[in-house]
């Protein structure tokens, strides 16, 4: 008897972990946006961003952080809807793609991303490593969008090929 997991099981469980890990991250980080320490923590990032600085100034730090939180929570819930609606999950995954692309632009506008004395390609612990993790989250969102959109356009929410 083979004691190693089969390739199909690894792929199926990997897909589940990829999608619902993304969901957990989006919802938990979204909830954190309602805390004072998270609001303060994102200020050095958003205050240097051409995309976020104006909105941060317009709404104020707490409100802007809460708006981001709502967007992240709703996006996570939409992606989690995959067993019931592939189309909702696809749209949520596409929203996550936009979020992660925008977050990754902070690499170019935030001072201190690269470790002092080393530079590229050595990220600093904060904010460099914090921002670079969004590359894999972007990939997870892209995979989720593609899988869910394929299922939505096929007219089925059935989970095929480990697509959950």
Image: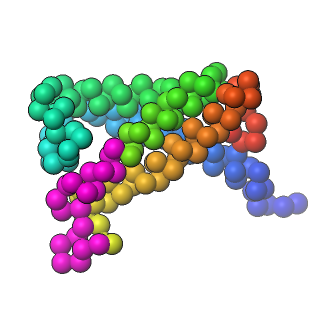
In the image as oriented, which residue stretches furthest toward the top?
A: 84
Residue furthest to the front: 50
Q: Among all residues in the image, which is located at the extreme bottom?
A: 117
Q: In the image shown, does 137 or 108 lie closer to the viewer?
A: 108
Q: Please indicate, yes or no, whether residue 9 appears anywhere in the rendered image.
A: yes
State yes or no: residue 106 in magenta: yes
- Count of number-bearing discs: 0
Q: Which residues are magenta?
A: 102-120
Q: Position of residue 74 (x, y in %)?
A: 42, 25
Image point (73%, 24%), residue name: 155
Task: Determine whether, in the image, residue 161 is placed left or right of residue 106.
Answer: right
Quick check: 61 left or right of 153?
left
- Image quadrant containing the N terminus: bottom right
Which is more toward the observer, 127 or 154?
Answer: 154
Asked whether residue 24 is in view, the answer is: no
- Would you identify the image quadrant in which residue 97 lies? top left
Q: Main secondary structure of the magenta part?
A: loop
Residue at 78% x, 56% y: name it. Answer: 6
Location of the C terminus (image quadrant): top right
Q: At x 62% / y 22%, what residue is drawn?
A: 85
Is 108 a magenta residue? yes
Q: Is 57 situated left or right of 141 in this image?
A: left
Image quadrant in which you'd find residue 12: top right
Residue 5 spot, x, y in % from top left: 75, 56
Q: Is residue 49 above or below residue 28?
A: below
- Residue 46, image x and y in percent? 19, 43
Instruction: Give the colouring mode of the picture.
Output: rainbow
Horizontal and vertical percent position of residue 88: 56, 24
Q: Quadrant of residue 52?
A: top left
Q: Which residue is pictured at 24% across the width and 67% down the height?
A: 114
């Amino acid at each position: 008897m083979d004691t190693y997991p089969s390739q199909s099981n690894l792929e199926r469980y990997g897909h589940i972990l990829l999608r619902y890990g993304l969901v957990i991250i989006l919802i938990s980080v979204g909830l954190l946006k309602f805390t004072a320490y998270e609001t303060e923590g994102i200020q050095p990032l958003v205050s240097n961003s051409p995309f976020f600085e104006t909105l941060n100034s317009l709404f104020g730090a707490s409100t802007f952080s809460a708006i981001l939180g709502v967007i992240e929570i709703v996006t996570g819930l939409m992606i989690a809807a995959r067993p019931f609606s592939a189309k909702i999950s696809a749209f949520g995954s596409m929203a996550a793609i936009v979020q992660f692309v925008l977050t990754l632009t902070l690499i170019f506008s935030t001072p201190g991303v690269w470790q002092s004395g080393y530079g590229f390609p050595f990220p600093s612990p904060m904010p460099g490593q914090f921002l670079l993790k969004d590359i894999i989250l972007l990939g997870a969102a892209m995979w989720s969008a593609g899988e869910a959109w394929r299922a939505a356009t096929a007219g089925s929410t059935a989970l095929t090929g480990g697509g959950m």
